[in-house]
Structures are given as structure tokens and as C-alpha cells.
Image: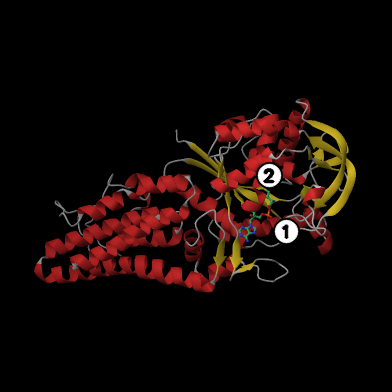
Amino acid sequence: MSTSYYLTTPIYYVNDKPHIGHAYTTLACDVLARFKRLDGYDVMFLTGTDEHGQKVQKSAEEKGIDPKAFTDQVSQNFRDLTATLNFTNDDFIRTTEDRHYAACQKLWAKLIENGDIYLDSYKGWYAVRDEAFYAESEITDGKAPTGAPVEWVEEPSYFFRLSAFQDRLLAFYDANPDFVAPKSRFNEVKSFVKGGLMDLSVSRASFSWGVPVPGDDAHVMYVWLDALTNYMTAAGYGQDGGESEYAKRWPADLHMVGKDILRFHAVYWPAFLMAAELPTPKRVFAHGWWTNEGQKISKSLGNVIDPVEIANTYGLDQMRYFLLREVPFGNDGDFSHTAMVHRMNGDLANDLGNLSQRVLSMIFKNCDGVMPTRPAQLTEADAPILAALDGLLEGQRKHYDSQMFHEALKEIWEVVSAANRYVDDMAPWALRKTDIDRMKDVLWVLAEILRQVAILIQPVMPEASQNMLDQLGVAADERGFDQLGGATRLSGGWTLE
Ligand code: ME8
């Protein structure tokens, strides 16, 4: 039986249209999900929408639509985006589904049973934009540290005994040094927890757009407790007959999040789970934020990037490649037309496109369109490049497991560059006149390089890689990672289309 790999995107607020930030987070998960499937894992890749809370309720009110009808509409936009951008999520969860209510209420009941939730009243600041509570000391000029406007809230509220979890969280971080990445972000989380934790308000009583608190109709659950639980809902928690799925999927292998929502995932979420005596997720990766031509992206500046527009302008695979190659994953990055065109012309057209074009057209013209067969004997000139090629997979696994997508791509492109130099050094066009057999061997080496490279770039560039593999004549069931690293070789002998 293959090993389970469960990874999640954040669930997106349905207050607005999807933008590049949403596409980026889901893209990172999509490439990882595809990579793991090709590497033989039983993958579950989850995304979805976060539909409760004041922020969504307000957006619905502004549009004059009932929140349920509004969330139905906007959630559909997110679902459509997954198809448009070729995302391969296995499930799409909405927090307004019955299965999710069941999971939230089960978790709540467990927290009550264990004595970690109590009724009191909340008096303090709340930022609807962040759906977060802030302490007096964090407020400057009526704004939260994130720049979100705050409002004063006074209402009865259930509290979660977060203060009791400081030591357990710190011990958990010590025991799990890879729980949060990048390292610098993990350090921020640890200092936040070392600074002391206050009990967390986990219900709201002044509006009703949320999951009802079991046994107290006056309250709905705080939207973040509701939202975080989605990861368990989709894994079968609280579902009739969900036990075997839950046993297989939980705890999640990876929660991918943006840096702005790390605290919820790396502090509150493990604390809730510890309190409920449930296993904690294995890892949380916090990626950086994109700016647009050097400027912070915001609705008020009118510079929000529409991922569908980018894909239409530059091509979907090109966009996918750019977003993951341009910026070390975890850092902030800048989206600019110049940078996008530079990557497309350089890495994609000149390096990979050119290699594939040269090799295929030489085979076509000089080998009567027949793929050369595997040479009986290779020369010393062929050995280093094939060794580099065969060695790629191990590095790819390491980089994907640490979410260093840019490093993974960089290493593949080093082999692509080496292959372009190999073409120049071997000069197959000259061999055509002097040693036709050697020319065929050289072209076979190059086709073998293209085959493995195309298999390896499938997660990032699903369409371009399929085209390459089709052109090379590689069968559809011979494109998994078990075909890499010298385990099998291009056999050749077939006529190219
Ligand atoms: O936070 N660049 O939902 P959301 C990169 N519902 N990423 C960006 C970005 C940018 N310019 N702007 C936003 C929520 N993002 C909650 C999550 S999970 C249990 C609940 C990222 O719709 C941001 O970091 O605000 C976050 O990961 C996601 O897009 C937006 O989520």
C-alpha cells in the first residue's frame, strides 16, 4: 500500500474575487501534490473556502445578498479557478457544508469535556479584515499591526484556555524542529509564544453567520476555530463512517499558508488539537507575499493581479514556472512584466525550448524521423551528463520535501544548460558527415535527457511536459518517477509523429 501524503491550502475567504495570492498558495500545493503522486504516494490535496464570520457577512450585506446565496456565488469562483489553473485538488471543502458543522461541533464538545473552554465576556479590539482580536498594546492610531482598522467589541464569549498551553507548545516546538518553515518564521512563532499567551475568545454573540455553539444558540464559533477545523473535516473527522479515512489521513503532512496567517496555524491550531488530545499536523510552511511592479498589492491601489489574466497573457505553464522559479520559496517577491518575459525568453525558450527543438529536428531530419535506439556502448564524453541527469531525482525529493521549489527547478535547468553545451561540443551536424552511428548515439543521449527532464518538470509545467513526452514517443504509463535515474532508459526505434 502506498504511503499517504495529505496537504492543504488555506481555505479562502469568499469576500472577494480570487487573486494572485490565492493562486500562488494553491499552485505551490498543486506542484507538490503532483510530485508526490508521480513519486508513488497516495495523495490527498485539499483546498476550499472559508465562508463564515463578520467579514463575509459584511461583504454579503454590502451587495444586498443573503450570506448563503453570496457564498454560493463566490465559492464557485474559487472552484472555477482551480480548473482554469489546472490544479489537481482531490477535494474542495466549504465551511458551510453539513460535514463541516459536524466536525466543528465534535471538536467543540471535546474541548468542553476536557475543561479547556469556559464562558466569560470579551471586551477589547477586533479587526474584521483579519478576523482577529488585538490587545490594547498592539493598537496604534486605531489600527492593528497589520494596518487593519479595529473596532471595540464587548460581548459574552466563550474562551479557550490558550494560556495553559505555553509550556506544552514550546516543548512541542523543541521536539519538532521542522514543524514550521522557513526557520526565521519559526523563530518568530517561538518568541511570540515565549512572550506569554492569553486565553482566546472562541465565540461571537453579536451576529449569527457561523457554526452554532452546541448547546448555546446565542453564540457562533469564532471563525478561525471553525476554519482551521476544515483540515480535519475533509480527513473524515466527525463523519459517520469517516474513521478509516481519518486514520489514514490525519495528521496532515503539510499545511501551506501565507506568512500573515502563520500564528493561527502554528500556535492556535496545535493548541486546540493538544487540548482535544488529537495529533498535531507535521509541518506548516509560511510563504512570502507578492508585490506588483514593486508596489504592495491592494484593492484601494487598484493593482490586484488576476491570475487568469496572467495565464492568458503569458501562458499557464509559463506563469506556473515563473511563480515558483523567480523567488526563493518563503521569501517575498515582485511580479513584473520584465521579470516574467526575462524568465520566459531565457529559461523556457532559449534553454529548454531550444534544446528540445534542436534535438527533435535533428532526429527528424537526420535519422529519418526514427528515434535512435539505445547505444550498446557510451563514451567517456557521455558519462558525466548522464550521471548528472540520473542524480537529479534524489535532489528533487529533498527540495520538494523542504518546499524549496526554486532549488529543484534550478538543478533541473543546470542539466538543461549542460545538455546545450553537450550539443555544441559533440556537434552532431558534423558527425552526420563523418560518423553517422556516433551522431545517432549523441542524439539518443540528448533524447534521454529530454525524457527525464520532461518527466521531472511535470509537476510545474503539466502541459508543456506532456507535449514533450508525446513528441518523444514516451508512453503515457511510462511517465512516473520510477522511470528515472537510470532505472529504465529510452529504448528508441519508433517513428516520431
Ligand atoms: O486568510 N502574495 O483567507 P484569505 C502572496 N480564510 N500571497 C498572498 C497575497 C500576496 N500578495 N495576498 C494574500 C484567509 N495572500 C483565511 C485562511 S485557513 C484555515 C483560513 C495569501 O482569503 C495569504 O497569505 O485572506 C493567504 O495564505 C491567502 O492568500 C489568502 O487567504
Instruction: Answer few, some or many: residues within 10 Å of disc 1's Cα (few below 14, many 20 plus, some between 14 and 19).
Output: few
Instruction: Answer few, some or many: residues within 10 Å of disc 2's Cα (few below 14, many 20 plus, some between 14 and 19).
Output: some
* Residue that carries the numbered disc 1 in the rendered image: 73
Q: Nearer the viewer, residue 472 or 62?
A: 62
Q: Residue at x 47, y 53 (%)?
A: 405
Residue lying farthest top? 114
SS class, disc 1: helix
* Residue that carries the numbered disc 2 in the rendered image: 264
Task: Judge left or right: residue 336 versus residue 396.
Answer: right
Query: Measured from the top left, where is residue 138 in percent x and y?
Result: 77, 51
Q: Quadrant of ligand 1?
A: bottom right
Disc 2 residue lies near ligand 1 with CB under 8 A: yes
Q: Residue at x 67, y 45 (%)?
A: 263
Task: Judge left or right: residue 358 versus residue 308.
Answer: left
First in sequence: mark 1 vs mark 2: 1
Q: Is residue 232 visible?
A: yes
* Image quarter of the C terminus: bottom left
Asked if residue 71 is positioned above or below residue 245 in the image, the reply reads below
Q: Nearer the viewer, residue 297 or 184?
A: 184
